[in-house]
């Protein structure tokens, strides 16, 4: 009877849980909601060089539709996104398979595989800036030793997007590899034993068993990388700042320059909200795809 009297009811447990978590939830909501709401408010206003503001409604968004720099930035953003994502998924899957099958690989070698994505983007950007320097960089030295012509790399309007995609792939393909490696380690061994008994080749086993079972994990890696790739900023700002000309001027770089170099905060807010909507749309689409392949 004493135990029944002192027992905690489900309603009381729920009330205690709400009371304990309420401060953290309120703080998190405030940290997220305030910047978003304030950015939306800024997007409906125009700011002059003297600091005065005026309500323009959807004026910033109508200006955005007619802005050639916006459409160019969108194209650069999507080109970098698609190229980097494809390279990172392919290389990350290959690295994951290599780490999965090379079980006797020393721990130091495994650590070197994953070290690039632990490197700060500023350090990575400056390192590649030196390597790819057209005059003193190691990349052109190696090309010339191989009898190949040197390249302008980041200084070339043609090669800047592939070069930036290569730098980001170098840094983040190991991160994708770790995600896919976790998926490989969770696959049931009984399926592979059955395939081996049936005499399936290694390629057939990968194509018919490993790849279909890994699809949910690959889509998860795609979602995580999509969020970063569509907000491409740090490597570009360190290496090219949107150049040469505007060849690598993504929406993020364009919005930063509009807001902090030209002090057009209202238009910059409209640009960033548009980019946020694109990110949410892509993530939502891949989320639904993940649910479909998992089913």
Image (tube, helix red, strand yellow):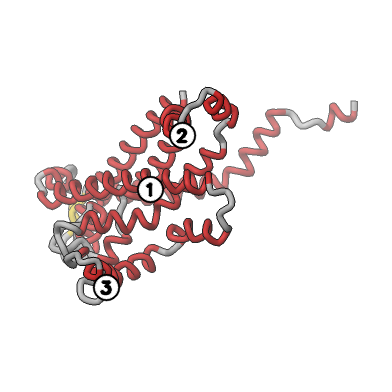
**Rendering quarter of residue 190:** top right
Q: CA distance from mark 1 to mark 2?
A: 19 Å
Element carrying mark 2: helix
Q: Position of residue 239 (x, y in %)?
A: 27, 66
Tell me residue 253's x, y (percent).
Answer: 24, 58
Crowding at mark 1 (Cα within 10 Å: few <14, some 14-19, many 20+): some
Q: Which residue is mark 2?
A: 202
Disc 3 element: loop
Q: Residue at position x 41%, y 36% from top? A: 219
Q: Disc 1 or 2, which lies upstream in sequence?
A: 1
Name, please, the residue furthest toward the bottom.
Answer: 136
For the residue labelled by badge 1, is the local secondary structure a helix, a strand or a loop? helix
Residue wearing tag 1: 91
Q: Which one is earlier in the sequence, the residue at label 3 or at label 1? A: 1
Q: Residue furthest front?
A: 199
**Residue 217 vs residue 126: left or right?**
right
Identify the mark nearer the N-term, 2 or 3: 3
Residue placed at 18% from the left, 63% from the top? Answer: 243
Residue closer to the observer: 54 or 34? 34
Residue annotated with mark 3? 137
Give the quadrant of residue 156: bottom left
């Amino acid at each position: 009877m004493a135990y029944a009297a002192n027992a905690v009811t489900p309603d009381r447990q729920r009330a205690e849980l709400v009371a304990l978590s309420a401060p953290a939830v309120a703080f998190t909501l405030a940290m997220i909601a305030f910047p978003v709401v304030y950015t939306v408010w800024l997007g409906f206003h125009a700011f002059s060089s003297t600091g005065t503001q005026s309500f323009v409604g959807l004026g910033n968004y109508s200006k955005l539709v007619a802005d050639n720099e916006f459409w160019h930035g969108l194209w650069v953003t999507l080109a970098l996104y698609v190229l980097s994502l494809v390279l990172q998924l392919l290389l990350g899957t290959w690295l994951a398979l290599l780490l999965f099958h090379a079980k006797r690989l020393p721990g130091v070698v495994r650590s070197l595989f994953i070290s690039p994505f632990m490197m700060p983007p500023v350090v990575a950007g400056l390192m590649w800036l030196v390597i790819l320097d057209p005059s003193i960089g190691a990349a052109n030295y190696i090309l010339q030793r191989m009898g190949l012509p040197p390249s302008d790399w980041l200084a070339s309007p043609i090669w800047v997007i592939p070069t930036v995609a290569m730098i980001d792939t170098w840094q983040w393909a190991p991160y994708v590899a770790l995600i896919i490696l976790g998926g490989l380690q969770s696959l049931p061994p009984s399926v592979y034993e059955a395939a081996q008994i049936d005499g399936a080749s290694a390629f057939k086993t990968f194509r018919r068993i490993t790849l279909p079972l890994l699809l949910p994990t690959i889509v998860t890696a795609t979602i995580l990388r999509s969020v970063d790739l569509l907000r491409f900023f740090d490597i570009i700002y360190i290496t090219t700042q949107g150049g040469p000309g505007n060849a690598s001027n993504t929406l993020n770089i364009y919005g930063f320059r509009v807001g902090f170099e030209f002090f057009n905060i209202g238009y910059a807010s409209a640009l960033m909200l548009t980019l946020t909507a694109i990110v949410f749309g892509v993530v939502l689409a891949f989320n639904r795809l993940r649910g479909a392949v998992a089913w």
